[in-house]
Image (tube, rainbow, N blue to C red):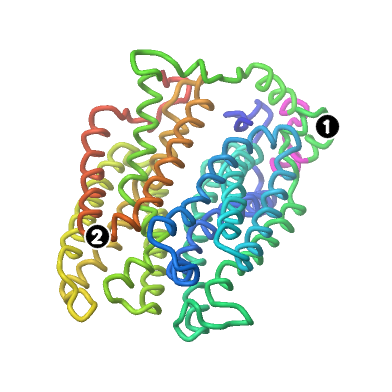
Amino acid sequence: MTSAEKAPASGAREAHPEHLAHVVFIAAAAAMGGFLFGYDSAVINGAVEAIRDRYDIGSATLAQVIAIALIGCAIGAATAGRIADRIGRIRCMQIASILFTISAIGSALPFALYDLAFWRIVGGFAIGMASVIGPAYIAEVAPAAYRGRLGSFQQAAIVVGIAISQLVNYAILNAAGGNQRGQLMGLEAWQVMLGVMVIPAILYGLLSFAIPESPRYLIEVGKDARAREVLEEVEGKDVDLDARVEEIRIAMHREEKPTFKDLLGGSFLFKPIVWIGIGLSVFQQFVGINVAFYYSATLWQSVGVNPAASFLYSFTTSIINIVGTVIAMIFVDRIGRKPLALIGSVGMVIGLALEAWAFSYDLVDGKLPSTQGWVALVAAHLFVLFFALSWGVVVWVLLGEMFPNKIRAAALGVAASAQWIANWAITATFPSLADWNLSGTYIIYTVFAALSIPFVLKFVKETKGKALEEMG
């Protein structure tokens, strides 16, 4: 599955104001998959310690239960495009909605630890599908004049989903008396946290019935009349619909489907540009960003913060994540991708180094000393802010732009796979590393943030203002 054509036909115009509101609704409905992506990724944060206690497991086993969803993510992302090309984008969204719903119910009512792990994989598969289908569908439906702004809905929905999941977890924890294993509605609080995702999952499925199929897919399966109706719906009545349909058909026939073999070259298996994409993906994860979303409540509790406050801090971190993402969306086209990445790297080094310093102090009465506790809290928010306003957005922008046309889709797939693998590595190792030495763990993340600076300076080329055809 590929994105829609880059420019409209000569007769095409921007969507009229009366159509724009409808197009915004369509993009927002599709981005609901991104909301579930963020929600499902972060909701586990509220259940980590309860799972450890209920099943009496060590850090290594706990980490595998948390990280195992990423295996499903990788499979879902790898197969979503092919599924969508066979049955359509809307049907793919509906399948993801069903999987999200089943995963939420199964995770809330597990019989045993292996059962919970299985439902985590199912949810991960849905996340992987949503991470691919949403952006591609929006690109294919949105009028060219609004494609960039509407495309940003996906990332915005992800960070909002993360924040809402933390807020819901906080509310549930308080309702259960501050105990993750406290009783609520006949279940333990952590089970309710995981089960609540049923609500947005069902809403996602219902919204999918209210939006049209992608014109590109409709043309591909010979439904030209319906494709014209959708194009008129999103681009207005003044568009030359026959010309737009023909333009899409011609572009589809011209496209070459890249293969893995096209990525090979040089002395180290892949072409250098592919390795740069892999490097960006790995650095994005190896600074430890997902520790802030998967384990933040556990992290704060480990240094003496009470459970209710730890959940509140997780929520405020998510709000900072939203603020940083908005900043990135404003400035990525103004100051460029490379400068923004470097600013973010410097900020992350400072934040992570301060956390490492704070966590190096011994606990007093089960808590960090006051000064170190406040430094750790402020530094954690500083780290998330600088990540969100830079690497959180910039990496995805660069991966979509930096590769030559012929290998773009295949190279992006390899880089995205590297990102899921790196995410898994960080998620699976943090509990054991934290048991070993929490300060040392943050020193490792600081080193990777520092190494990202020379990597960007030496290998990453600015793509701001360049046509995709210029990438070579």
Q: Quadrant of residue 207?
A: bottom right
CB contact under 8 Å: marks 1 and 2: no
At mark 2, the secondary structure is helix
Rendered-image quadrant of the N terminus: top right
Q: Quadrant of residue 221?
A: top right
* Amino acid type of the residue tagged 2 in the rendering: Leu
> Which labelled disc corresponds to residue 438?
2
Residue tagged by mark 1? 223
Q: Residue at x 77, y 29 (%)?
A: 219
- Residue range (magenta): 230-244
C-alpha distance separating marks 1 and 2: 58 Å
> Is the residue 13 above or below the residue 121 in the image?
above
The image position of residue 255, as x and y in percent, is: 62, 19
Count of marks, rendered view: 2
463 or 369: nearer the eye?
Answer: 369
Q: Earlier in the sequence, mark 1 or mark 2?
A: 1
Residue 106 appears left or right of 189: right
Residue 413 appears left or right of 140: left
Q: Residue at x 64, y 16 (%)?
A: 254
> Is the residue 384 above or below the residue 344 in the image?
below
Q: Nearer the viewer, mark 1 or mark 2?
A: 2
Q: Residue at x 24, y 78 (%)?
A: 366
> Which labelled disc corresponds to residue 251?
none
At mark 1, the secondary structure is loop
The image position of residue 181, as x and y in percent, is: 50, 78
* Amino acid type of the residue tagged 1 in the rendering: Lys
368 or 314: nearer the eye?
Answer: 368
In the rendered image, residue 146 lying in the magenta stretch gets the answer no
11 or 359: nearer the eye?
Answer: 359
The image position of residue 95, as x and y in percent, is: 71, 48
